[in-house]
Amino acid sequence: MDMDMDNLDSKRKAPRRKGDDRVILHFDLDCFYAQCIENANPHLKSVPLGIKQKSILATCNYVARKHGVKKLMGIQEAKRLCPDLVLADGEDLSPFRDVSKQIYSLLKSYSWNGRVERLGLDEAFLDVTDVVAYNLGLVNHHCLEESWFCLSREDPERGFAFDAREVKGCVWPPDFVSDRENEGTDSLRLRLLFGSHLAFYLRQQIEGLGYTSACGISTNKLLAKLAGDRNKPRNQTTLLSSHSPVPFLDPLPLRKIPGIGSKTITAMKSLLKTDDDDDDLTVHNARTNPAVSPFALERLLAGSGGGGEKGIGQKVWLLLHGIDGSEVKPARDVPRQIGIEDTYRGLTQLSQVRTGLVQITTSLLRRMHVDLLDDVDAVTPPISPVPTSVGKGRWLAQPKTLRLTTRPYHPPSEWDKFEYNHGRVSKSAVLPRFVFDLNIEPESIAERLVEGTLMPLFHSLNPDKSKLCIGLLNVCVTNMDRAKESSRGGDIMAAFQRQREVEEIRGVAFADEPPDGEEKAEDTSDDTEVEWVEEEDEQDGVRCRLCGCVIPVFAVEAHGRWHELDEGWVEPQGG
DNA sequence: CCGGGCTCGT
DNA sequence: ACGAGCC
Ligand SMILES: Nc1ccn([C@H]2C[C@H](O)[C@@H](COP(=O)(O)OP(=O)(O)OP(=O)(O)O)O2)c(=O)n1
Ligand SMILES: [Mg+2]
Ligand SMILES: [Mg+2]
């Protein structure tokens, strides 16, 4: 079905895509683990502090970062850069989880729609479109400097005063001028401005708990997160150019875009025929190269053999242009899985494995009580015992599956021979119901779980006892039900259909040839070879609607169904 | 001297 | 059960 002109025209007149009218906040606590340790030991706030897990630093405070210490750096290197670095152990995540829970509860209490999505222990997205819209309706446009931000629909007194003439905190771009004749009630700038004041208020509330944070304010999750990165400790950034984010994204290293990981980078480098360092490959490099099409990406990442995510090509291409329609998910009352793991310098005897599993399992049962049992204290109980609370604890969820994961140990001398996670394997079993019986001694539960379920799993994962050498044990309970939704096809035609959808947004076809009726055996692929066309003459090219990058004409001709575009084309900077 | 987690898609 | 991505 060819697109008709009506369709094209409507896209052009109403370029608003889904997500453009939202207000999204992204919070990220500053050096989270370090702040947790500092608040428990305030004298550490002024010294360089690293939080270690075995031989690496999970994170470090900003005093240490001044000396060049980085997150995830080896301890040896960190000590070399900063001999005075103070180390605290962070292998047990319980104290960090407890703080995390406090902060999320606070944020949740200010949300009207429950859309507070947690990312790790220290980040959250909030969709505050409704709160902002409500306050936009109340504002007196003749007295912006003495505005009142309502935090409750029921109680108008609950809120804070603010100056609605200016955005709170940092702004990008720094020289932004609102282009429209005037900011109507519905203007993007005013909505983000309101979001910025709400963000500042919430950051102050978080500081009331003792923790500083960064925040990004924009119209989707991708942009909000990246905006927050712009001004990092204890600050916030509003992306006023959220409607045309390409100049904001272009200078960023590709690696910084959430959703584009190392595998995707490798695939894109092969399309770009570059050997650049990952950090030197920018969004601009990828965005302006015609070889980087949704379909080409799809073939590399999800094509025959690679069981990658269907639609990954489309997703990545859209991310490069700042488009992210994904919703802020509602806060969950209970996590989908709870796991505990530990690493070892090679466990060679079953007795050692058993001891490790008992340790982990004891810890896991304690976590299950804190996270899945209602009414228990919000703080992890000190030291060893699993809470024996026979009291009025009710299970919020009862996981159904127990999974054991192991990985062999390899000494550093063999690190070049194996991938880091080589040999990682896991196996699941039904989680026995007795773990939910609050009348049984916790120590007894752990023993029975290890003897009856985990050791058998271990034997089946690791049948060869002669060269037993374990580097990692992980025990995880799952199955607090996972929703699966109907998925689209992953075949080659579906991949091309997805590319067509992107073409609608982009306004011009990609250079890829349409697939033939039958699948060509993954051949020399002449059609993947996209030649660069060296032409300064833009008359022979068309421009991408989103970013204005020039696409050589042959791309259009190759596809054959875009002749109409030449007439109706509107230069991007016109409006 | 390469943590200890979590979610999602296939 | 595993891979990829995120913190
Ligand atoms: N690969 C990772 C990433 C993060 N973390 C932990 C340690 C961090 O303290 C916490 C939050 O991760 P961030 O990436 O937000 O890092 P920080 O909060 O420490 O620093 P920043 O100030 O840059 O946000 O999660 C970890 O253990 N391993
Ligand atoms: Mg973070
Ligand atoms: Mg952080």
Image (cartoon, coloured by chain):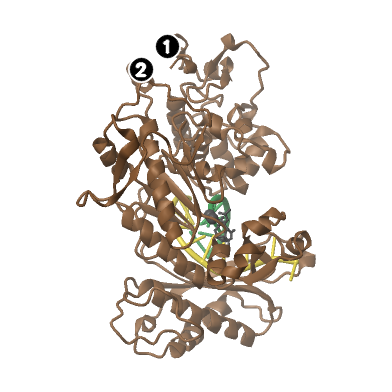
Chain colours: A brown, B yellow, C green
- Residues at marks 1 and 2 touching, judged by CB atoms closer than 8 Å: yes
- Residue at screen point 45% across, 69% down: A98
| Image vertical order of residue A189 relative to residue A378, above or below | above
Name the amino acid, label 1: Gly
Image quarter for ligand 3 equals: bottom right
In screen coordinates, is A150 left or right of A529? left
Residue picked out by circle 2: A9
Q: Where is residue A442 shown, x and y percent of the image?
A: 43, 87
Give the vertical position of A462 relative to A323 (above or below): below
Direction from residue A549 to residue A82 in the image, left or right:
right
Amino acid type at image mark 2: Asp
On what subunit does the disc labeled 2 rest? A
Picture quadrant of residue A418 = bottom right
Residue drawn at (53%, 18%) of the image: A543
Chain under disc 1: A
Res. A301 image quadrant: top right
Circle 1 SS class: helix
The disc placed on residue A216 is none
Marks 1 and 2, how far apart in space? 8 Å
In the image, A87 versus A444, the foreground residue is A87
A518 or A498: nearer the viewer? A498
x and y percentages locating residue A570 in the rendered image: 45, 13
Above or below — where is A99 with respect to A290?
below
Q: Give the class, few, some or many, for how many residues have Cα within 10 Å of label 1's Cα (few <14, many ≥20).
A: few
Q: Earlier along the polypeptide chain: callout 1 or callout 2?
A: 2
Give the numbered dot on residue A568: 1
Q: Residue furthest left?
A: A154
| Image height of A145 relative to A5, above or below | below
Q: Secondary structure at mark 2?
A: helix
